[in-house]
Amino acid sequence: MKDFEPKIIAFLCNWCSYVAADAAGVSRLTQQPNARVIRVFCSGMVDPGYVIKAFASGADGVLVAGCHPGDCHYISGNRKALRRSRLLERLLLELGVEKGRFRLEWIAASESPRYVEVINTMTDDIRRLGPWVTSAPEAEAACLKRPSDLVLDGQRPAAATSG
Amino acid sequence: MSRKKLALFTATGCRTCENMVLDIHYQVQRLDRLFEIVFWPYALGSQLSDLDDLRSIDVCLVAGAIRTRSDRQAAEKLRGKSGLLVALGACAAFGGMPGLVNRSQASGNPPSPVAVDIDPQSEPVLGELEPQVAALGQTVAVDYVIPGCPPTQPLVWAAIQAALTGAGSNTHLSFAMSRLPKAVAQAIASGVLPPRGTVFAGEKAVCASCSRVKQEKGFSKVIRPFQDYESTGRCLLEQGLVCQGIATREGCGGLCTGVGIPCRGCFGKAEAVYDPGAKMVSAISSTFQTDEPAEIEALTAQFHDLVGTFYRYNLPTECALLRPRSRC
């Protein structure tokens, strides 16, 4: 576990959080290099499917960050993100994704120290939790079980078309 | 035309899918004219050992999830003998309700009472279990899938016709074909085998065939089906019921929503949906009437057992986080 480096997917909104992340870099604030940033136009466009897909594809944590409520460039996108996040958190918890692996944060364009703090605490939290591993088994032969692989081709169409 | 050999089998399931094959109305007479039923434990009392004497089967309908080792053996045996293997019903197609047991991560058999002599005749014991419940398609190769719990008669009949490839159109079939993707319907009507892997249901979501009206209004209280709500007219989701039509494949014709019962998702996820749970979270929470954090919290707390609700029929295959990971 010693050399475990968490992979965090960070969906940052174009107008606030991404600017904060950018400014954090420009101002040379020290941050842990575990976040993979995906710039989105608004935190309100981050569908729960994106978050689930991130975890299914091997992410250890997902951060969604947007403007503070009331500051949204699109008026109410971040409120929509908030509405979704509570139910999504519960679903993730039931699916075995521990609390702390998914976070929704409000980070304004001027709050680059806040961005750094969120990334650092989240990385530390997840480092403590360890890698996210699904409880599902590894499909031992699912790759081989496609119809085209298994079936003896001469045999089947004959059975299907005879008569 | 010589009669084709048909076999039917249910692994772990309630056998309603097999009943549905008997329930195709007058077509059931034609079933006997078109098929020679060679193996059907439910109706003919066939034994699994009878399979050894059979040389080949043309069409095999298998219902039920793969739960025990004997389920797996039967599925493998039937696959080996069958020309076309069809997964019948939600359990065979997606793992079904028995698949919800995968949440408990059970490994091996549940503990049995120690030092008690059990007479297997009077007290049958459970066979050896697979580590996880699987859908038929995760165990053997499947040619066609008929989803539904149970599958509706028109789709069952359409699939049987397709397997025969000698289709003749009639009203029963044309209803099914209106629900099927165009290419599949045309294949059936012209007597060609539809492509392997065809799902005998629609492509869009149940909402596409639901007649209810959306008013773009939100809800402020979660309602369960036994409580009071408008059972005609308005969209059920907007009234606060957990209706999964938006994440579910159509093909049923909106049977449940038509009589005011919220969709439970028995046709599996719609083609364009990545994960049915995520889709439902998105659909439900965007119908919340409020934007206030405290009220959102209160509304969210009214939902129970999200996994058991959103993945009721398809946990082993369609839940992005709990289905077996493939390495390819």
Image: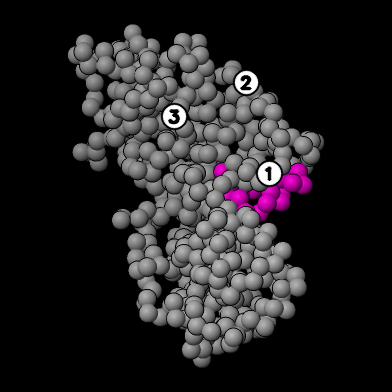
Identify the amino acid type marked 1: Cys
Q: On what subunit does the disc labeled 3 rest?
A: A
| Distance between mark 3 and mark 2 Cα atoms | 19 Å
Closest to the camera, between mark 1 and mark 2, is 1
The numbered mark 2 sits on a residue in which chain?
B
Rendered view: B312 above or below A18: below
- Which residue is farthest bottom? B53
Task: Determine if the magenta segment contains residue B249.
Answer: yes
Which is more foreground, mark 3 or mark 2?
3
- Give the extent of the magenta segment: B247-269
The label on residue B210 is: 1
Of the pair B192 and B129, the residue shown nearer to us = B192
Determine whether B137 is above or below B49 in the image. Answer: above
Q: Can you tell which quarter of the image residue B122 is in?
A: bottom right
Q: Are marks 1 and 2 on the same chain?
A: yes
- Whole-percent x and y of residue A160? 49, 77
